[in-house]
Image (cartoon, rainbow, N blue to C red):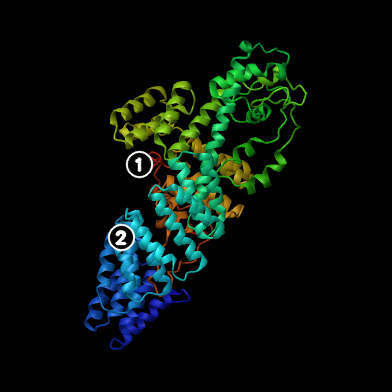
Amino acid sequence: MYKGETESAIRKFNELIENFPTSDLTLTARLWKAKALYNSNKDDDAILTIDELLPDAEKNGENDIIIEALMLKGQIQIDREDYTYAVDVYEKATNISGSGALLAIAQYQLGLCQSRLGNYREAAEAFKKVEDYNPTVTKKYQAQLREGVMLSISGQHEKALEVLENLKGQALRLDEKGMVELEIANTYKRMSDTIIAFTMYDRIDSVYKKTDAAAKSYYERGLSYENDYKDYRRALSFYEKAKSEFPSSEITPIAQKKFQYLTRYFKLNDDLIKFDSLLVVKTKADLLGINNDSLQIAEDISKVENIIVNSENRALEDTNDLITEVNSQEEDESYDIIDEDLEPLPEEHSLLEARTAHSPLVNKAMRDGEIENMQSGENAETILAKGISADSLNGQKKVVTSGQYSKVSLDSLKKLISQTKFELGVLFLLDMNLYDSALYVYQDLVENFPESKYAPRAYYSMAEIYRERYDSLMVDSLYKIILNKYEQTEYSNQVKRSLGIKIDNNSVEPADSLYAEGEKLLNSGDVANACKCFEDITIEYPSSPQAAKALYALGWIQEVVFINNDSATSIYQKLIKNYPNSIYTAEVKPKLAIKEDPKTVDKYIKINEIQGIAKTVPPKKEQNNPGELDQNKRSQEQLMRNQSPDEEPNQDEEEPEEEEPEDTDDGG
C-alpha cells in the first residue's frame, strides 16, 4: 500500500481474509482492503466493503475500526461533494467511543463539511468540540483558527475576536501567528472597520513577509478595491503582489487570474481610447483645419485636445504605435487596410506580440522565443500624445504627414473598435461578473456597429444574460433579431437549435477550418501562429465545439512545448470554468490542485486527512496531443454553459466534430 501498489495490496488482503477467516487481523485487513480500493479509485467497491465490515466490527467491539471505516466513507462523500451525506457519516463516527486522535480528526472533518454547506454556526460548534478529544497540537491550532473564522463569517464578530485573540496569545510559529492576525483583520473588515483592518494588513505585510498570511493580506485588499471601491488600478496592484508573495498559497492562482483579467481590462480600455481618438481625428480632419500636406503639432495640438477632451477626456496616444498595430493586421481578412502599395510602417511590435502582450492565454516564453525574428523596421517620427505642447517638445516641432492618416481606413478602425468592445463585454461577463456592464457594452456595439461580425455574437450573449434572469420576452426578441438579420451566422444556427428549428448541417463552420489551420501550423512547427489561430477561436467562436478544444490546445502548448505550468494552469482553469462538461475539461481536471471559486477561498483546501496513507494517483499516460482525444468521448462536448450568468451559453444539440483517427499508442 505505501509503495502505491494498490492492486497487489488488494490481492494480499484478500488472501489473508480468505485463508485466515478467524484471524485477529481479518477485520483490520478488510479495513485496509477498503482503503486500497479507495486508492485504486474504486469508490463504490470501497463503500460496499465498508458496509459489509461495519456490522462485524460492531459485533466484535472494534470501535476504532468502525470510526476509521466511517471516516473513509465520509471522505468518499466529500470527494463526491455530497457534504450532507458526509455530515451524517461523521456525526455517527463522533458518537462512538474510541481513539481520541481519530475522533478529533472526525470532528474536524465534520466542521469542514458544515462550512462547505454554508452552516457556519454549526461549523463553529463542530470546530470548538475538537478540543474535547485528544487532538495534536497542529490540529488543535487549525480547529481554533477555523472556529474563529466561522464565527466571523456568521456575524458573531465579538466571539470571533475573543477566540482569535486567545489563540494569538498562545505559543505559535511565526507563520501561524500571521494567519491568526490575518483572520482578526478579516473580522474587522467584515465589521466594516476598514481603518483597523487595513492597518493590520499593512502590519502583516511587514512582519510576515513571504508567508501565506502576507499573500492573503494583499489578496483581501485587492478584493476590497475591486468589489467595494471599484478602484481597479489599486486592485490590480494588490493582486500583482498577492500572486508572487507566497507561490504555494492557495490564493496564488486566483490572484494570478484576477491580475490577468484586470490587466486585460485596462488594455482594452486603452485600445478603445486610442481607436476612438484616431477615428475622431480622421473624421474631423476638415473641421480641424489640418493641412493636407503636414500638421504642425506645436501649433494645432490644442484643436485636437479640444475635440478629444470634450468627447473622451483623453488625447491621442502614440499614434505611430497605433497605426503600426493596425497596419500589421493586413494579413487578417477582417481588416481593410488601404494604400497597400505604400511601404510598410515602422514596427516596434508585430501583431502577434501586440496580441499576446496582454493575452491571458499566450505566455511570455512564446513571445520572447517566437516573435524576436518577426520584428522589423525603424523608429517612427510622428507622435500625438496626451497633453502634448510646444514646451514638452523641447522646442522641436514634430510633423505628421497626411499620408500617415490614410494608411488606416475608417472601416478598419470601426472593425477594431467593434472587436475591442466585444472582447470587453466578454471580459465583463465571464471574468468580472459585471453583467450590467456587459449588457451596456453589447448594446453599444449592436447599435453603433450593426454590420460588424461581432454584432450577432453580442446579441446572443445578451440573450443568454436575459435567459439567466428569466426574462423570456427579451430572449425571444433578441433571438428574432439574430434569425432575421444574421441568418447565415453560426449564432443563428445556435438559436435554431434552441428553438428546435431544423438547420442545414452541410455548411462548414469557420471555427472548424480555423482549428484545422492551427493544427496544421502546430504540426509544421509554427507554434506562434498556431497559438494565434487557437486564441482567435476562443474569442470569435466561443459557442463552437472547437472553442474548448482550442483552449485545451493552448494549455497543452504551454505545458508541453514551453514547459510553463503557470500559464498552462491559467488556461486550464479557464477551460474548466467556461466548458465544465467538456471532455477536454475532464482531461485537465486531474492536473489542477485546486478548484476555482474566488468567493470562497476555504473551498480550495483539500479535505483529505483521514487516510493512513495518501490516496495515490495511477501513473499518467503519455501526454495527449489536442487532436488525439478519444473520438467516442467527444459526444459529451457541450458548447456553452447554462448554469449561471457568468457562464457562456449552452446548446441543446451538439454538432459532430471532424472525425480524427484514434491514437493507438495511448488509447485516447
* Secondary structure at numbered mark 2: helix
Residue at numbered disc 2: 114
Instruction: Name the side, left or right, on which 2 lies relative to 296.
Output: left
* Residue that badge 1 annotates: 642
How many numbered discs sit on the rendered protein?
2
Callout 2 crowding tier (Cα within 10 Å): few <14, some 14–19, many ≥20: many
**Residue 445 percent location from the top left of the image:** 46, 26
Mark 1, secondary structure of its residue: loop
Q: Earlier in the sequence, mark 2 or mark 1?
A: 2
Is residue 660 shown left or right of residue 526? left
Q: Distance from label 2 to label 1 (Cα)?
A: 28 Å
* Of 484 and 38, the residue lying toward us: 38
Residue kind at label 1, given as amino acid type: Asn
Q: Compared to 369, does 289 lie above or below?
A: above
Residue 649 appears at what percent x and percent y? 38, 38
User: Front-most of 341 and 291?
Assistant: 291
Determine if residue 405 is in view.
Answer: yes
Vertical position of residue 312 compared to residue 617: above or below: above
Give the residue drawn at x 52%, y 41%: 262
Res 44 visible: no
Query: If the image is split into quadrants, where does the N terminus sit?
Result: bottom left
State the residue in front, 325 or 141: 141
At label 1, counting other C-alpha atoms closer than 10 Å, the crowd grade (few under 14, some 14-19, many 20 or more) is some
Indicate the quadrant where residue 286 lies.
top right
**Left-right relation of 488 to 70:** right
Q: Pick whichever, 645 or 281, lies toward us.
A: 281
